[in-house]
Image: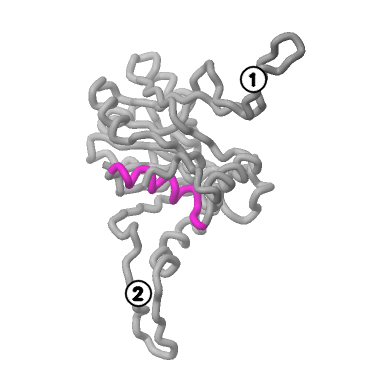
């Protein structure tokens, strides 16, 4: 079972948080957000990843190519041609990460189509975005997908509120909640599951196609898209304010998405 992560967007809305890194590499604590997403899959046994690269993809390649050196003690013999000696293993040593160049201006649907060869032999593959964290139970999501037997499952979430909510009795405030989760309406939260044999006809051949438009709309019209409702924590990182909020939760040891 592979988890595909869309890591190619330019993240224009969060440029004020960091001008040099692609959004999947923006750190929450000491590690980039894409690492947090991958840890959330790995704790449920999904440790084979395909990252769809685009904007500044070489920086994501560098991060994973240098991962062992970044996370363990290493001895380097200067003036010789001996290989570096790594003194211990890191916790992610059983991960497999395929770093796939899918084009800088490719749409999300085009990116998925571009990595077909890496996933089509597995029967099923998972997919999510490289800029949001969640405490979803991946095993339950997969079981739900297998039970209904359709081509695609999308995780439905309630968007986090962006403003405080107050309840009034006359002029008196009886309840005040800072940025509550919305109580009505569901949106696409990512964390998809796809049938890797049947989904390709819906993706088509347009590399600029957006997964969220015609492919998913067509699947819905054909009755082949089912929603898995997740009522727990879900938070995208679309703005500098959300970036700061996620880092604040992590630094205080209150990160709901840390399930490992």
Q: How is the image coloured?
A: one colour
- Mark 1 surroundings: few (<14), some (14-19) or many (≥20) residues within 10 A: few
Q: Is 48 within the magenta?
A: no
Magenta segment: does it hold 34? yes
Q: Residue furthest bottom?
A: 79
Q: Which residues are magenta?
A: 30-44
Check the image and name the residue furthest to the top: 170
Q: Which residue is mark 2?
A: 86
Q: Is the residue 4 above or below the residue 179 in the image? A: below
Circle number at residue 175: 1
Q: Quadrant of residue 110?
A: top left
Q: Nearer the viewer, mark 2 or mark 1?
A: 1
Q: Callout 2: few (<14), some (14-19), or many (20+) C-alpha neighbours within 10 Å?
A: some
- Residue 167, horizontal then vertical, whole percent: 66, 16
Of label 2 and label 1, which has the lower sequence position?
A: 2
Q: Residue furthest right?
A: 171
Q: Which mark is residue 249?
A: none
Q: Residue at image x 46%, y 30%?
A: 189
Q: Is residue 247 left or right of residue 155?
A: right
Where 216 sits versus 98, above or below? above
Query: Picture coordinates of residue 147 (x, y %)?
Result: 23, 23
Is residue 111 left or right of 239 when viewed as pictured? left
Vertical order, 102 against 59 (above or below): above
Write down the quadrant of residue 205 in the picture. Answer: top left
Residue at 34 percent of width and 14 percent of height: 223
The residue located at (33%, 31%) in the rendering is 193
Q: Quadrant of residue 218?
A: top left
């Amino acid at each position: 079972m592979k988890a595909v992560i869309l890591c190619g967007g330019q993240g224009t809305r969060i440029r004020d948080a960091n001008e040099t890194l692609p959004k999947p590499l923006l750190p929450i604590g000491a590690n980039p957000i894409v690492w947090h997403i991958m840890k959330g899959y790995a704790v449920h046994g999904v440790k084979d990843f395909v990252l769809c690269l685009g904007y500044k993809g070489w920086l994501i390649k560098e991060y994973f190519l240098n991962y062992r050196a970044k996370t363990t003690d290493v001895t380097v013999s200067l003036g010789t041609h001996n290989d570096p000696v790594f003194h211990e293993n890191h916790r992610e040593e059983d991960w497999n990460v395929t770093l796939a160049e899918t084009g800088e201006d490719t749409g999300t649907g085009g990116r998925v189509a571009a990595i077909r060869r890496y996933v089509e032999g597995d029967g099923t593959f998972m997919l999510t975005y490289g800029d949001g964290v969640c405490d979803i139970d991946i095993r339950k999501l997969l079981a739900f997908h297998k039970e209904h037997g359709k081509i695609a499952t999308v995780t439905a979430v309630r968007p986090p509120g962006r403003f405080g909510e107050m309840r009034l009795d006359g002029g008196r405030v009886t309840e005040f909640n800072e940025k509550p989760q919305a109580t009505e309406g569901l949106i696409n939260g990512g964390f998809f599951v796809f049938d890797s044999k049947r989904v390709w006809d819906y993706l088509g051949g347009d590399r600029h196609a957006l997964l969220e438009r015609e492919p998913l709309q067509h699947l819905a019209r054909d009755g082949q898209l089912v929603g898995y409702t997740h009522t727990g924590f879900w938070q995208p990182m679309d703005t500098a304010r959300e970036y700061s909020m996620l880092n604040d939760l992590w630094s205080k040891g209150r990160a709901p998405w840390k399930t490992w």
